[in-house]
Image: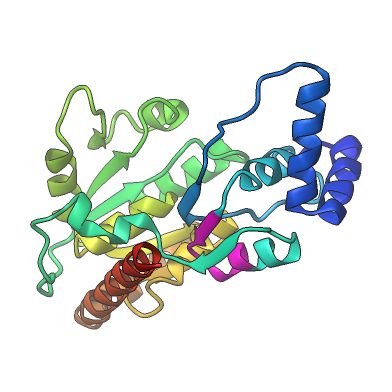
Amino acid sequence: HGGLAFTVLNFISRRLGIQNVHRLDRWIRRIFKKSNRLTSDLQIGLGIGIGPYSRDAKLLMRHMTMLGDFNILGVRDKKSARFLVDHKFPGLQMDFMDLAFLTAYWHPTRSVQKEKVYTGKIGIILQDFPHDILEKFDVIKQFVKQLEGVDVTFFSFDHNHDVAYTKEFAAYNFITWHPDKNEMTVFLDALGSMDVVISARAHGVIIGAILGVVPISLGISQKLVEVSKYFPKGGMLVEEPFAVSSLVACLDNVIVNYEQHQSFLVEEVDANSRAAMQAKEKLFSE
């Protein structure tokens, strides 16, 4: 949140639209002899998620300027597509998927996941939350305390930015993705060995699902809410403010109906992967 100044600036930016905000940025840079942003003959953005933005969001104008650089934008959800329409994106707009669903590029050995049997292994993926961080961490700790007969492993997708998260849960079984210290296959094998993943990161939900792990999305942002829609029957969503009781109830639902969740998840992952490949083929065929 940026206060009154950003509220006014964002109001003007929304009225101007992406193209005019982009032109204004170029004009200002020319006057003050600042270097331009990345330039190219053709710029394509794929799997992009945009917003949502509060009325006084600090990043809105900057992001609108960046979006104006693109000739083609393939967005991953309906809200992002609506943003481009509402703010008069001048380039070619197309529906796309999250790039993680193009598994041939990062997980080429993946075949259709066989339905797994629940064995009591739960993965939890958190992050340094932008607000109420200690309160959220405390809810997760209380939730873990209530679990019986369950093997819990915490995962970090970003060792550079998960500073508070890593410190707060260091005493637990904790696995961090660190590209300088371990290979991606090791991290993926560990995550894929879980039965359920409870995630506050969008790609924790998506990657977990692709690996055959039933995802529970923590709806700490609209981004997580939108991502949960990729798996309407295979996964579940716990909306904010999440509490111990809502987490327990959600996990119990998954465990009781695990076979059903698994069956739906396999279908939904494959459907999303096919849609991603079709979108890629459409892009390069045109």
Tell whether position 73 is magenta. Answer: yes
| Residue 142 in the image: above or below residue 181 | below
Q: Position of residue 154 (x, y in %)?
A: 29, 42
Q: Quadrant of the C terminus?
A: bottom left
**Camera-nearest residue between 281 and 242:** 281
The quadrant in which the N terminus is found is top right
- Residue at 50% of width from left, 46% of height from top? 42
Residue 36 occupies quadrant: top right
Instruction: Find the magenta span and give its range.
Output: 72-81
Q: Is 94 left or right of 6, judged from the image as shown? A: left
Q: Identify the residue at horizontal 15%, vertical 68% (top origin).
A: 118
Residue at 16%, 53% (x, y): give it: 107
User: Relative to 125, does residue 30 appear above or below in the rendering?
Assistant: above
Residue 132, given in percent of the width and then of the height, sits at 61, 41
> Can residue 220 be seen here?
no
Instruction: Confirm whether the magenta stretch covers residue 196.
Output: no
Of residues 63 and 120, the one drawn nearer to the viewer in this rendering: 63
Residue found at x 69% / y 39%: 59
Provide residue 72's location: percent of width, then percent of height.
53, 56
